[in-house]
Amino acid sequence: MTSIDTIDDNLLCTEAVRDPYSYFARVRDLDPVYWNSRHRAWVLTRYSDVARELRSQALTAERITPFVPSVSRSSQSDELAATFKILEDWIVFRDPPEHTRLRRLVARAFTPSVVKASTPEITATIDQLVADLRGRDDLDLIHEFAYPLPAVVIAQMLGVPAEDRDLFKEWSDKITALVFGAYGQADRFESAARGMMELRDYLLGLIELYEQHPGDNLISVLLEHEGDDALSRDELVATCTLLLFGGHETTTNLIGNGMLALLSHGDQRDLLTQQPDLIGPAVEEMLRFDGPARTTVRLVRDEHDIEGHTLSPGERVFLINGAANRDPEAYPDPDRFDITRNPTNHLGFGVGIHYCLGAPLARLEGQLAIAALLQAFPRMELAVDHDALSWHGTMLSRGLVELPVKLHG
């Protein structure tokens, strides 16, 4: 009988980065709940286990504070300490009751009316990006479309002047390397800290501006009191950095991975072209089939058992969203890309109290962007073989480094 020991225990090995679905399918078949000694973490790959543990109060999202001591004291600069303090205030790293309070205050910025009101600006940004692509043939769809779009959109929504939006993209890149676990980057802590401090100082100036002169933007919404409660200055800075980060990286990968799925499955691309009203279900299937969330990390707070395994307080848990979304016990023929499937229970945005607040905005951007690309460039095709594509080697996210295409339009 094959043992889990026959599989490379490096969760960022070449196979796990290039084709995590085959890699984790083998892990799931051999041992769906196993202790990975290399990463010192439990690895869960079944849909039922991942969904249950995402909702479980036996796990904690507060993993920044315990992580800090693992960074060598020699690299603990004042900037890095301040960076970790900002990360500690991110909603995604907080548990109730702090999480409940923060989420209630921040949710005001993502009501259906607020998201819907952003449609004209998002559409205008997409139209401009598409116009800039016309007349081209070979190009990288990530860097010339999927990457700038969400960065511009979230900057617009926060109230960042147009001339400063390229700075936001640079800061987001630096923070990404730290949060998503780009282990191959030796200077990721120092680079992220520099970027975070520059972003913090910029945001403080912007917050002061909109405190004195409120505008039609998310910062002005977040500055408002709700009864006697309001975000503190530190919480406001932390929330804005989270919105920049979460609103950029995840949506870039949703658009990139989604377009790759369509370009790799001509029948589904043709179906969506013929029936554009399927764009909503299509994006849900993209989130299930090859979504931007690779892994969710938690720590064990309360001891509990899963399939005869005891998870003890302080141990790390890797909840593999991508593997759960390809679990044959949850989805028939899970490796088939089918835009009519409409998998509304996928874990692409998580589940439970930490369900992604920005999911409605990401869905809207994804639907508008992919629909616009298909309409503008109906003959678009991959410019390289699928095997030649390069993926970011990060633990938490799933995203392409480049997506070379030929527009033929």
Image (cartoon, rainbow, N blue to C red):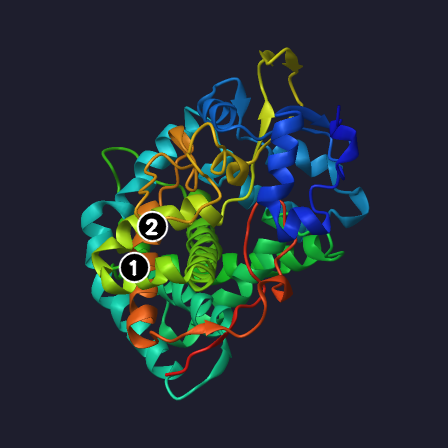
Query: Which of the image's four quarters has the C terminus?
Result: bottom left
Residue at point 33%, 52% (across, down): 282
Please give the name of the residue rendered at 53% of the width and 68% of the height, measured from the top-left corner. 403
The picture places residue 167, in percent across and down from the top left corner, at 50, 70
Callouts 2 and 1 close, C-beta under 8 Å: yes
> Which residue position is annotated with label 1?
271
Q: Residue 247's image quarter?
A: bottom left
Q: Residue at x 36, y 62 (%)?
A: 269
Three-letter amino acid code at the position of disc 2: Ile
Amino acid beneath label 1: Leu
- Image quarter where the N terminus lies is top right
Residue located 63% across and 45% down the image:
395
Query: Of the residues under marks 2 and 1, which one precedes in the sequence?
Result: 1
Residue named by callout 2: 339
The residue nearer to you, when weighing 340 against 135, is 340
Q: Nearer the viewer, residue 3 or 45?
A: 3
Residue 75 drawn above or below residue 61: below
224 lies above or below 204: above
Q: Which numbered dot is residue 294?
A: none
Is residue 175 visible to us here?
yes
Residue 272 lies, in percent from the top left, at 29, 60
Label 2 and label 1: CA atoms lie apart by 8 Å
Most extreme residue toward the bottom is 135
